[in-house]
Amino acid sequence: MRDFLKALEIQRWDDHRYYHHSRINQSLHFISAISFLCCYALLFSDPAAAGLIGWLVAMISRQAGHFVFEPRGYDEINHATHEYKEAVKVGYNLQRKTVLMAIWALSPLALYLDPELLGLFADDAGPSSYPHRLGLLWLAIGAGGLAFRTLHLFVLKNPQTGLVWLAKILTDPFHDIKLYYRSPVRLLRGELMDPMADTKHASEQHARTPPPSQPPPTFSTWTASFPRRAPSTSSSANTWRPPWTADGLCCNCSRISGAMPPMSPRSSDWKRMATS
């Protein structure tokens, strides 16, 4: 669960710093978020009205901010091109949104030409049936878009990424209100672009963070660096010898790790000197 929430935080942070620089776009997202909350309230009592409000108000205002007002030049704050940001976007980038919006725009014509829509709706030719059917159709298109991209992310990345993105989309109205409720006021003050001070601060903090230092050596790594003599096959291999040898290397390094080599009967004098 902790990994899921961490991934959700990362997706939200990347979505904000990459795709919401314009104060107009942020203000439109604030309006869109309020509209989506109204859709949530109507979803179980009047789903057709929820579909109409969701697309005519919430989606149009939200996507207009991305297509019209969000800058597409080089991002000096994040040091990223528009092409890079479109390539790494987890959800619907502008190209995918164009396809989704085209399906939405052509759906009223398809419903007008075939009121039953291949048998999905009952045969009712009343004048009030068309808006009701259209709202349900738009609601199905929205749900289908969410399901398609979620399953697509299952295949492209992993199931967690898809579920995190789905959770982000469903909770975006609450998060956008919290994040952009001041944007309309700042827009009226003449601030067209968000200076992204929080993004700059995070980048500076990351730049000032020193690289992790090497952990201090442990006792085992310290003793492992000591030289070792090659094992001997002679009969004197088990005989203890002083730590100075002819080749200048220590042959008694095993004593450091606590393993006392066996002493020969002739080394009793050395043993008595060590305990005196």
Image (cartoon, rainbow, N blue to C red):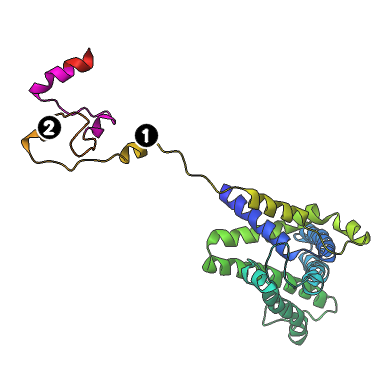
Q: Name the residue under label 1.
A: 219
Q: Mark 2 points at which residue?
A: 238
Is label 2 in a helix, a strand or a loop?
helix
Instruction: Indicate the position of residue 104 as horizontal and vertical percent values.
Output: 74, 77
Q: Which comes sooner in the sequence, label 2 or label 1? A: 1
| 101 to 209, vertically: above or below | below
* Residue in view at x 20 percent, y 39 percent: 247
Instruction: Indicate the position of residue 158 as horizontal and vertical percent values.
Output: 52, 62
Q: Is residue 254 magenta?
A: yes
User: Most extreme residue toward the top, as rendered?
Assistant: 276
Q: Do the residues labelled 2 and 1 touch (CB within 8 Å)?
A: no
Residue count near mark 2 (Cα–Cα under 10 Å), binned few <14, some 14–19, many ≥20? few
| 221 to 179, vertically: above or below | above
> Over which residues does the magenta segment extend?
252-271
Q: Viewer-proximal residue, 92 or 228?
A: 228
Q: Quarter of the image holding residue 33?
A: bottom right
Is label 1 in a helix, a strand or a loop?
helix
Instruction: Indicate the position of residue 13 as horizontal and vertical percent values.
Output: 69, 56
Q: In this view, does 188 lie to the left or right of 109?
A: right
Cα separation, mark 2 vs mark 1, equals: 25 Å
Question: Is there any visible trace of residue 144 in the rendered image?
Answer: no
Q: What's under tag 1, amino acid-wise?
A: Phe
Q: What's under tag 2, amino acid-wise?
A: Asn
Which of the labelled discs sits on residue 124, or is there none?
none
Question: Is there any visible trace of residue 49 in the rendered image?
Answer: yes
Q: Is residue 3 magenta?
A: no
Instruction: Indicate the position of residue 89 as horizontal and vertical percent values.
Output: 64, 67
